Each structure stands twice: as structure tokens, then as C-alpha cells.
Amino acid sequence: MDFDLIASEYARHRKIMLPVLDGLRDFVAAIGHKAAVVELGSGTGNYIIALAESTGCMAWGIDCAKGMLAQAVSRGSEVQFAIVERIGHTVRVTNAAAYAAKAYSG
């Protein structure tokens, strides 16, 4: 499935499951107030943004779907998002904000 093609619809319809978010909050609470969380496969950022906003943890979201990350960045949270790309035998991680700025500028 090409998540770049469905990113805007996914962002509009995909909702957080509260029992999952509650479990994540409990996990962060057990770590303490200086928790740092990385979500691999963060997509549009639903969970990582909600977790960061509700707990105050430092948070990063990483995904390979640029369209999904553009949606996440457009939400304007404190969460940092990064794009991961595989190029041959190398993995490159870049900040998603630059891509999102380009995607929404026209």
C-alpha cells in the first residue's frame, strides 16, 4: 500500500484508540518526567503527538511515507518528525519539516 497516496484521507479518518493511548501514558509515567519516546512508523502522528501533549515527554516520530509525515508536521506540534529512506544498503534519516514545507507550498 502506498501511504503517500492516501495520507490526507488517512489523516482525516484515522482516530486514536484510547485504551492504546492509556497504555502508552502508563509506560511513560513509569519512566518518569524525563521520558524520551521514539515512534517508528508514526504515520500522521496521532499517537506520538497525543502522548507528547498529554505527558510532556520529548518525542520523535519516524516514518518512510513522506505524505504521512507531511500531515503530521502540518499539525504544528512540538514533536520532531523524520523521514527514513533506504538507498541501496544505506539508510538515510532526514528532518520531515523541510519536506512538509515543500509539499504544502504548492
Image (spheres, helix red, strand yellow):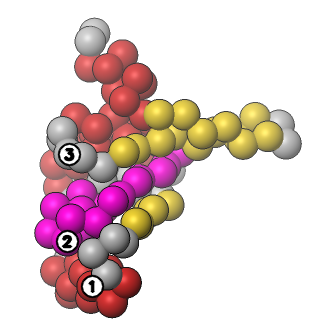
Res 55 quadrant in image: bottom left
Q: Is residue 46 visible?
A: no
Q: Which residue is mark 1?
A: 29
- Horizontally, residue 56 falls left or right of residue 63, namely left
Q: Are marks 1 and 2 in contact (CB under 8 Å)?
A: yes
Question: Compared with residue 102, is residue 35 higher up or lower down, i.e. above or below?
Answer: below
User: Which residue is painted at 33% across and 90% down in the image?
Assistant: 30
Distance CA(mark 3)–CA(mark 1): 20 Å
Distance CA(mark 1)–CA(mark 2): 8 Å
Residue 77 disc label: 3
User: Which residue is painted at 20% across and 45% down in the image?
Assistant: 77
Three-letter residue code for mark 1? Ala
User: Which residue is painted at 24% across and 57% down in the image?
Assistant: 49
Question: Compared with residue 59, is residue 94 higher up or lower down, i.e. above or below?
Answer: above
Distance CA(mark 2)–CA(mark 3): 13 Å
Binning the other alpha carbons within 10 Å of mark 3 as few (below 14), some (14 to 19) or many (20 upward) gives: some
Q: Position of residue 91 (x, y in %)?
A: 72, 42
The magenta stretch is 46-65
Frontmost residue, 79 versus 19: 79
Residue situated furthest right in the rendering: 89
